[in-house]
Amino acid sequence: MSIALSRPITKRFGLRWLWVTPLVLVAALIAGTAIGETSIPVDTILKVLANQLLGADYPVDRIDEGIIWNYRLSRAVVAACCGTSLALAGVVLQALLRNPLADPYLMGISAGASTGAVAVAVAGLGAGMLSLSLGAFAGALLAFGIVVMLAHAANSGVGGGRGVQAAGAIILAGIAGSQLFNALTAFIITKSASAEQARGIMFWLMGNLSGVRWADATLAVPAALFGLVVCLWHRRSLDAFTFGADSAASMGIAVRPVRGMLIIAMALVTAVMVSIVGAIGFVGLVIPHAMRFIVGSQHTRLIPATALAGAVFLIGSDILSRTLVSGQVLPIGVITSLIGAPAFALILVRGKRH
Amino acid sequence: MQLSAEQLTWAVHGTPLVVDVNLTVEPGQTFGLVGPNGSGKTSLLRLLAGLNKPKTGLVRIDNQPLHALKQRTIAQSIALVEQQADTTDRITVRQVVALGRTPFLSALRAWSIEDDAIVVKALIDVDMAHMADRLWHTLSGGERQRVHIARALAQQPKILLLDEPTNHLDIRHQLSILKLVRQLPITVIISLHDLNQAMECDRIGVMDSGRLIDSGPPHDVLTASRLQQTFGVHAHVIDDPVDGKQVMRFRNAV
C-alpha cells in the first residue's frame, strides 16, 4: 500500500506543475472569500478586486464590498500566509532534526510564542503587531532552546548519540516544553490581565482568524514570503541533511551556521503567525508528510508544494470553521487538530512499522 | 592531493580517542588503517575529514590547514563514507548519489547535464546502475554501502576517506570495491578489519588506544609479533602457491 501511495508522481511531471501553484492559490483565496454564512458570487468578488486593485469602478453593493475586501479576503490572505509558514517550519524542522514528528506546535515553539506575545500584551509594552511579534519570537526561541536541550539530555542519558535521534525524546521534551509555557501563559493571564483582556487572549490562544484585517496581512505576507525564500535558497542544504548532520558536513554544509539560521528564521516566521492568529496545531506536521507522499522528499519540489498546500489547507480549514456550525465560528485550531490528530496517529503507526 | 596530520589529538568528555597522531599520505596512495575495535580509526577519519576539530595539532591538505578552509571548499576535495548513515526519507538511489554534487551546486548554480553524467558514472563504478530508481529503504545493507560509496565518488574528491566500507558487503562486492578504490587515481584512506585485504594497500597504519603505533609498507607492519601484540592473535604468514603473495592465517586468540 505504502509503495503505491508514495510513488512520486513528479517522475512524470518534473517541475512543470509549478506554474499551476499561483492559480491554485488564487482559486483558494477566491473560494475563501466566496464561501461563508452568506455566499457571494464569484463575479462580485472579481468586481471588488478590480475596484480595489485596478481602480475600476464597477457598481457593487457597499456592504458586499466591505465584507469581501475588509473581512473575508484579508482573512483568507492571512490564513494562506499562516498555513504556508507553519507548514514550511514543519518541513525545515523535520529535515534538520531528522525526526518525522518535528513540528512547531508539538515542539513547544508555538506555546513559547504564545507566552511571549501574551507577556508583551499584558505588560502593555505597546500592543502593536510588531512588538507582539517580537515578544512571540523571544518566547519561541526560548521554548525551542529548552526543548532541544531537554531532548539532548534525555538522549545522551540513554546513549542516543549522534545520527538519527530518538524520535521519542524530542516529542516528550516538546510536551514538557508546551505544558511549561502554556502554564506560564495561564499564570500571566490570571495574575495580570483584566477580565476583558483574559477573554480576548483565551479566544486568540486557540487559534482565531476573526479579528484579522489588512493591517495583519501587511506583516503576515512579508513574513511568509521571507520564510519561503529562505527555504528555497537553502533547499540543497536541507537535502544534504538526508543522512544526518555529519553527512551534511562532509558534503560541504556549514552545519552550525546553516542549521542555526534556518531554525531562527522558522521560529521568527512561526512567532509572527502566532502573534496574529494564535497557536494553530498540526499544520506543520500533516502538510509536509502529505506532500512527501505526492512529490517525494527532495526539497526543490517539497518546499513549493508544501507552501501551496499549507496555504490551501488553512484557507479550507478557515472556511470549515466558519460554516460547520451555522451561526458560530469555531476556533480554526479545532479544525486543524481534528484533521491533524488522526494524521499524527497514522505517522506514529507507520513509523513503528518501518 | 597530499593529506597530512600533525600531532593530532582529540578527546570526548576527557577520554582521549586520538592521541598525538602524525601521518602523511602522498598523492595517489591508498593508505589502510587497521586496529582493534575502539582503537580510534573512526575518530581519526572524522578529524581528517574536518568533521571534528582537533583539540591540538592540525590536518593539512596540500599544505593548507583544514581549519582555515570553508566546509564547502573541504567538501570539494575530501569525501567521507561513514560507517552508519541511514535515513527514513523516501528517496531513490539516484537521488542519494546526486547529493554528492551538493558542494558544487548552489541556490544559483543549478543542476546540469554534467552532474547527471557524474552520477551515472558513480553508479556504474559501484555496480548499482541497474538499481538507480529503487527506493533507499528497499536496499540491503551492502547495497546501501555501495550507494554511499557512489555518493562519495560523485563528489569527485581528490581525497577519499572510507570507514570500514566492506563491512556489509558480500565477498564479491568486497573485492570489487577494494579493486575500484585501489585503482582510483586519488588519495585514499580506508579503515579495514580484514587484515589480508589491508595487505593490498600501498601503506598501512596500525591504531591502538588512539595512537598510530606503526605505519609503513604492509609486509613490514603486519608481522606475527605485531598481530600478537596489538590484535591479540597468533598468526602465521604463509605464501600462496598460486601467485606467491603472502597470506595471514589466524590460529587463535592470545
Image: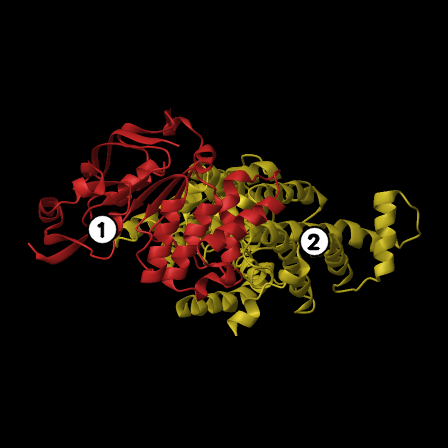
| Chain under callout 1 | B
Q: Which numbered marker is on residue A18?
A: 2
Q: Which tint was used for chain B?
A: red
Q: Which chain is yellow?
A: A
Outermost residue, left side: B254
Front residue of this view, candidates B148 and A137 = B148
Does residue A3 appear in this view? Answer: yes
On the same chain, marks 1 and 2? The answer is no
Q: Is residue A113 visible?
A: no
Relative to B21, is A57 on the left or the right? right
Residue situated in front as seen by the camera: B227 or A338: B227
Q: Mark 1 or 2, which is nearer the eye?
A: 1
Left or right: A287 as drawn, with respect to A152:
right
- Residue A158: which quarter of the image? bottom left
Instruction: Name the residue type under label 2.
Output: Leu
The quadrant in which residue A127 appears is top right
Separation of disc 1 and disc 2 at Cα? Answer: 61 Å
Circle on res. B214: none
Which residue is labeled 1 in the image? Answer: B245
Give the residue drawn at x 63%, y 60%: A10
Describe the element under mark 2 as helix, strand or loop: helix
Total labels: the figure holds 2
Locate residue B232, reporting x and y percent.
10, 51
